[in-house]
Amino acid sequence: MSDISEIMSANTIKKAKALAKNGVVMIDSDLFQVKSSSDPSKSYMVTSDSCDCEGFKNFYKFHHGKGLKANCSHLEAVRIFKTMSDEKPNSK
């Protein structure tokens, strides 16, 4: 797999890290609710490979033919959240 920085902008990665800390709620084993980074009244439903935000839906319009898999800050936030959860001791 390519380095994530080759696929996503630094700003998107920054937003994803912030969302992973404070904006992700696990609903089920592969379903998460992730806050919008730009509108506090919105949130998106995210699985391990999809998101219902406009950026994810429009990904291929902007990156068609580049061989990239659709991604967005919400999807990346879930990946980071899962990694952080795996690293935490079960002391809480």
Image (spheres, grey):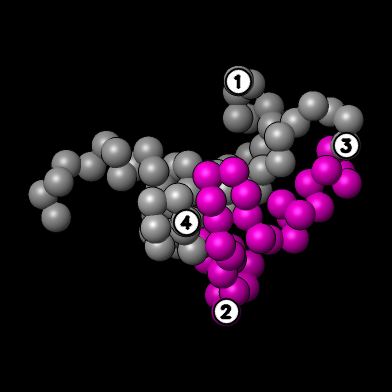
The verdict on residue 38 being magenta is yes
The quadrant where residue 36 appears: bottom right
Q: Which residue is mark 4?
A: 31
Q: Which residue is mark 3?
A: 64
Q: Which mark is residue 41?
A: 2
* Disc 4 to disc 1, C-alpha distance: 23 Å
- The residue mark sitting in front, 2 or 4, is 4
Front residue of 88/48: it is: 48
- The residue mark sitting in front, 2 or 3, is 3
Magenta stretch? 34-63
The verdict on residue 82 being magenta is no
Q: Which residue is mark 1?
A: 1
Residue type at mark 1 is Met
Q: In the rendered structure, are the residues bearing label 2 and label 3 in contact, judged by CB atoms less than 8 Å apart?
A: no
Residue type at mark 3 is His
Q: Position of residue 74 (x, y in %)?
A: 57, 53
**Under tag 1, what secondary structure?**
loop
